[in-house]
Image (cartoon, rainbow, N blue to C red):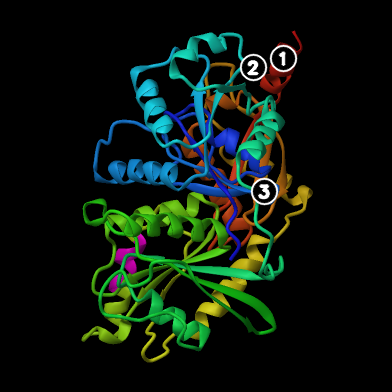
């Protein structure tokens, strides 16, 4: 495949990296929230077919093994990048950790652009406060109001190597991309071969055989399918230096590139913490998901009672993705392999579903009437209307007022109501809440 130049966005947690990423890419790919550390893994997007943009997790002290893995991925992104966007919150005075990160970035000898983000806010600091970093190219940006976005893209275009000419036919928009995700030796390569119907991936008993993304293109039931087989993601204590660590980045890239992910677990070792975290990563990326228990043929007691017991345990452990279908497969016997194609086709159709605005608002009013949201005295969240703004996955924007008082449990309630009314099995759905009074106030402040 054609390799575009790569730009890594790095900085402390909650500096606005994901919002800036979304502005540069031009679509909502990264998760944006007020809580620090929302981005847990590297998210990859493409800017104007000129370069790849990698949004990394915010740097902070590694509190546990998983956090250490995330920070390793940030370091890998810096190593693999052709240029780096160092994003800081311009409303906060730089900390020692900012200076240490700037030193680490400059040591990489890569072109660096310092983005002073949130420059639209009145309390933002001037560029002189950040001169001690020693970074020459400085741009004041605002992801909220698109300030400095064009200048940033132009500056990156000047320092990056030119994008190579395409040498391969790019898959059509109608191509369904399915990624096989999981820990090493979960049976991904064997399932890849069973699905593709040919021996394209190397299958070995030794864990970690697949290093890059293996691809297969074929048709199923008249539809173009691209299958992506990835290296297994290990726990941080088992991650080797060098190429093994870069295989994690390729796995994250495969998740971002895919429409639907098959999360594989060996029937002999299900429900690990890493499997649950991978399910969260897939969901946060907005991708469809099917939980696949592989190697069913290797189990001695594989009657219906055993399957039901195992299914109940998995459902409990993966309660953060209750909409993910669960299927038991065997690449050796072919059990349920064809069923995976049927499931992915159904999920792909649901991800493209467009719900009429009238039906959405009938549902919204019924939900609010049945269970009004809590708030403060005389100040309750008020819901005016809801519209669908995107598909693949479905994205819904709710307009109203006093949304800062909405409890997270009420958002879950609205999602449950949506899923009961419309079939979104196998795919996450996203919500944004737009406070019209706050939007109006922000516009007035920006004009002053």
Q: CA distance from mark 2 to mark 1?
A: 7 Å
Image location of residue 333, percent across then percent down: 38, 92
- Asked if residue 153 lies in the magenta stretch, the reply is no
- Residue highlighted by disc 2: 120
Disc 2 secondary structure class: loop
Q: Which residue is mark 3?
A: 50
The image shows residue 3 at horizontal and vertical percentages of 57, 58
- Magenta stretch, main secondary structure, is helix
- Say whether residue 254 is left or right of residue 280: right
Closer mark to the observer between disc 2 and disc 1: 2
Badges 3 and 1: C-beta atoms under 8 Å apart? no
Mark earlier in primary sequence (2, 1): 2
Q: Residue 89: x and y, percent?
A: 50, 21
Region of the chain picked out in magenta, as a range? 309-315
Q: Are marks 2 and 1 in contact (CB under 8 Å)?
A: yes
Q: Nearer the viewer, residue 75 or 21?
A: 75
Q: Is residue 92 visible?
A: no
Foreground residue among 203 and 174: 203
């Amino acid at each position: 495949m054609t390799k575009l130049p790569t730009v890594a966005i790095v900085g402390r947690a909650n500096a606005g990296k994901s919002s800036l990423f979304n502005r540069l890419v031009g679509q909502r790919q990264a998760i944006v929230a007020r809580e620090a550390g929302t981005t847990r893994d590297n998210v990859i997007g493409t800017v104007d077919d000129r370069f790849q943009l990698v949004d990394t997790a915010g740097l902070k002290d590694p509190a546990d093994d998983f956090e250490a893995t995330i920070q390793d991925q940030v370091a890998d992104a810096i190593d693999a990048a052709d240029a780096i966007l160092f994003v800081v919150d311009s409303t906060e005075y730089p900390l020692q950790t900012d200076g240490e990160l700037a030193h680490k970035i400059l040591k990489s000898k890569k072109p660096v652009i310092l983005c002073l983000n949130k420059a639209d806010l009145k309390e933002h600091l001037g560029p002189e406060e950040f001169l001690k970093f020693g970074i020459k190219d400085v741009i004041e940006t605002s992801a909220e109001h698109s300030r400095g976005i064009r200048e940033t893209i132009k500056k990156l275009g000047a320092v990056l190597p030119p994008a190579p000419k395409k040498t391969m036919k790019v898959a059509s928009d109608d191509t369904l991309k399915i990624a096989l995700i999981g820990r090493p030796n979960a049976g991904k390569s064997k399932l890849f071969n069973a699905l593709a119907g040919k021996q394209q991936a190397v299958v070995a008993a030794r864990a970690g055989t697949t290093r890059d993304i293996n691809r297969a293109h074929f048709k199923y039931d008249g539809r173009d399918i691209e299958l992506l087989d990835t290296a297994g993601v290990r726990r941080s204590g088992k991650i080797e230096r060098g190429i093994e660590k870069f295989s994690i980045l390729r796995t994250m890239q495969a998740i971002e590139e895919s429409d639907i992910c098959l999360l594989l677990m060996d029937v002999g070792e299900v429900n690990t913490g890493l499997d649950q975290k991978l399910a969260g990563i897939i969901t946060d990326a907005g991708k469809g998901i099917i939980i696949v228990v592989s190697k069913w043929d290797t189990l001695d007691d594989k009657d219906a009672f055993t399957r039901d017991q195992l299914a109940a345990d998995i459902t409990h452990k993966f309660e953060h993705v209750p909409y993910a279908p669960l299927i038991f497969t065997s690449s050796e016997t072919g059990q349920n392999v064809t069923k995976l194609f049927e499931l992915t086709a159904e999920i792909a159709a649901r991800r493209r579903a467009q719900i009429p605005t009238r039906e959405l608002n009938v549902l919204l009013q019924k939900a609010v009437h049945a269970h009004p949201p809590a708030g403060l005295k005389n100040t309750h969240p008020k819901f005016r209307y809801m519209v669908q703004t995107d598909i693949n996955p479905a994205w819904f924007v709710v307009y109203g007022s006093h949304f800062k008082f909405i409890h997270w449990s009420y958002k879950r309630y609205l999602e449950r109501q949506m899923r009961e009314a419309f079939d979104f099995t196998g795919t996450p759905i996203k919500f944004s809440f737009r406070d019209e009074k706050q939007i109006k106030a922000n516009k007035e402040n920006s004009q002053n």
